[in-house]
Amino acid sequence: MVGVMEMSATAMAVAPLATSSSSRFKSSYEKALFLRGSSLSARLDYVSLSLKTKRVGKSFASQVRGSSVATNVDVSEWNKQVREDRLAFLETQAIDALRKTIDSYQKPAFPCALITGDVVILDLLSRVGALSDEKVKIIFIDTLHLFPETLEFLAEVENRYGFKAYRFQADGMANKEEYDAKYGSDLFIRDVDEYDRICKVEPFARALKTLEVDAMINGRRRDHGAERAHLPIFEAGDMAKVQPLAYWEFRDSWDYIEKYKLPYHPLHDEGYPSIGDIQSTIPVPRSQWFEYGGERSGRFQGLKNKDGTTKTECGIHVPNSK
């Protein structure tokens, strides 16, 4: 009986050590010194209780894992709610950015290419009352190489939102025929930088100068990837740049369009996630649309920069330029 009592007392003394040895001993060396100075029975009890503690821990973990597997939880509903909450926050953030821009600048403008995010921005601008009275002017660059559907869609959204876009194209060119006669129909192959300068960069710069734009709203987002991966919502400079959708994803834009039943570019239904010039834009499998950088994966096909790198920009969005 005395032996049992002595063993129990020893176990009681050793139990805290077995369950909290990591905090009691700073190193395995200190633990070894302690055990070496203890009686044989104390050392045996320590080892026994340590093993039991580990078994209990493993058993408890197994029970937790088993219970989570056995429970029927429809996480799709959770994810749906998360996406709805996320979109509500992103809408508020974007509207706030647009209102700040309208209140703080004299002549803001939005160059619109009519892709998914641009349709979202048009609708947001309409919601803050910035289109009908031209608080924000809409710029449209006709590269003379656009899909016919793009020009048709422009007329549709102009009618829907009650605005008239300011259209600009290659200097001195009334149409594609005049352009081809002067520059040739294959300039984008012979010298893509010159093509960009004539059809995009110069008309865009002329639009900003003509309209005296002091804040340029645009649809660039971080999930476009490449040079856009770390965009802020606001960029200071001689002409401020405002990206109200900077933190949105491509899927968010579609969630917004579906939520408000908005019209969208008809070529999306033909497999084009983004729409640019007809000669360098291709359809992309829908399974790739919502990957990082997926929206613009069908743009600038077959085109390289002069240094041999893959082309991802047309030269319009240059940091802190006007």
Image (cartoon, rainbow, N blue to C red):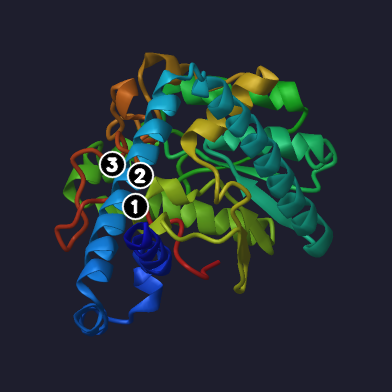
Q: Which residue is mark 1?
A: 53
Q: CA distance from mark 3 to mark 1?
A: 62 Å
**Of marks 3 and 1, the one in the foreground:** 1
**Of marks 3 and 2, the one in the foreground:** 2
Q: Which residue is mark 3?
A: 300
Crowd tier of the residue under label 3, counting other residues whose Cα lies within 10 Å: few below 14, some 14–19, many 20 or above: some
Between residues 281 and 78, which one lies in front from this camera angle? Answer: 78
Image location (x, y in percent) of residue 202: 46, 56
Total labels: the figure holds 3
Quarter of the image holding residue 290? top left
Three-letter amino acid code at disc 3?
A: Phe
Side (left or right) of 289 relative to 259? left
Please report contact status of discs 2 and 1: CB closer than 8 Å, yes or no: yes
Three-letter amino acid code at disc 1?
A: Thr
The residue that appears at 57% across and 37% down in the rendered structure is 118
The residue that appears at 66% across and 24% down in the rendered structure is 157
The residue that appears at 80% across and 44% down in the rendered structure is 134
* The N terminus sits in image quarter: bottom left
Crowd tier of the residue under label 1, counting other residues whose Cα lies within 10 Å: few below 14, some 14–19, many 20 or above: some
Q: Is residue 53 visible?
A: yes
Q: Is residue 155 visible?
A: no
* The C terminus sits in image quarter: bottom right
Tag of residue 56? 2
Crowd tier of the residue under label 2, counting other residues whose Cα lies within 10 Å: few below 14, some 14–19, many 20 or above: few
Secondary structure beneath label 1:
helix
